[in-house]
């Protein structure tokens, strides 16, 4: 073999290895994204189940207008939901104003007052804030009673999560909904 043949083989081998490395890195990035998405969805599902577990009579509906200046202190205590967060700490979530959206809304149109709940989630537990997932949630409880429906309330959570991937921040949003009837579930 000549030196030129060895150099050409080295260049070809380098190009193949760079392609394999790029594929591996892309696969890892997609896997991490899926893990974060599943973790956030599981966390929001947990909030939804906690709210759904309240007694029907104590599950108040969302207010029709933002109280006062929109601070938590202005909110009527009946429109505040006390839940446990991902670390089992008590959190306060104020119900979003008005009727819940029926499809995923543009996040910029949602209220930015006390009805917004923000939580930092350390998914990989490395105690670094640089890679935390920031979860924002808006919660609506609306009465469906009337017409052919008796004693039902809809619970809707619209959520947005932000995650830093290297130097970039990616923002995703989704929503979950369920119905709570007056029929006891326990």
Image (tube, rainbow, N blue to C red):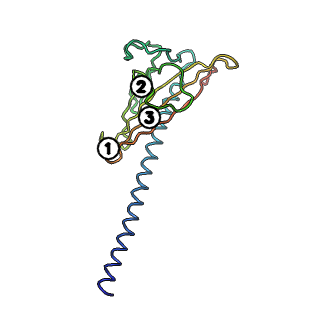
Secondary element at tag 2:
strand
Q: Which residue is labeled 3 in the image?
A: 160
Q: Residue furthest right?
A: 148
Residue 90 point in image, percent of width and height:
40, 24
Q: Which residue is labeled 1 in the image?
A: 126
Secondary element at tag 1:
loop
- Kindly identify which numbered label has been placed on residue 140: none
CA gap between label 1 and label 3 equals 22 Å
Q: Quadrant of residue 144?
A: top right
Residue 147 point in image, percent of width and height:
69, 17
> Which-is-in-front pick, marks 2 and 1?
2
Location of the N terminus (image quadrant): bottom left
> Which-is-in-front pick, marks 1 and 3?
3
Q: Determine contact: label 2, label 1, CB under 8 Å.
A: no
State the residue at coordinates (41%, 56%).
26
- The crowd level at tag 2 (other Cα within 10 Å; few <14, some 14-19, many 20+) is some
Mark positioned earlier in the residue sequence (3 or 2): 2
Q: Which residue is labeled 2 in the image?
A: 116
Residue 115 or 39: which is nearer the viewer?
Answer: 115
Residue 5 point in image, percent of width and height:
34, 83
Residue 89 point in image, percent of width and height:
38, 27
> Does 21 sit above or below residue 93?
below
């Amino acid at each position: 073999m000549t030196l030129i043949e060895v150099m050409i083989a080295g260049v070809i081998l380098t190009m193949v290895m760079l392609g394999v490395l790029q594929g591996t890195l892309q696969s890892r990035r997609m896997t991490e994204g899926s893990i974060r998405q599943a973790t956030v969805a599981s966390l929001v599902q947990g909030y939804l189940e906690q709210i759904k577990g309240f007694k029907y009579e104590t599950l108040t509906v969302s207010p029709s207008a933002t109280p006062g200046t929109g601070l938590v202190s202005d909110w009527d205590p009946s429109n505040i939901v006390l839940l446990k967060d991902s670390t089992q700490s008590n959190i306060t979530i104020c119900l979003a104003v008005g009727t819940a959206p029926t499809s995923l809304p543009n996040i910029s149109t949602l209220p930015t007052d006390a009805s917004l709940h923000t939580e930092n989630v350390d998914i990989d537990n490395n105690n670094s804030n640089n890679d935390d997932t920031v979860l924002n949630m808006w919660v609506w409880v609306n009465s469906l009673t009337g017409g052919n429906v008796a004693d039902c309330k809809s619970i809707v959570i619209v959520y947005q999560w932000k995650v830093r991937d290297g130097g970039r921040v990616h923002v995703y949003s989704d929503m979950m909904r369920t119905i709570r009837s007056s029929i006891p579930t326990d």
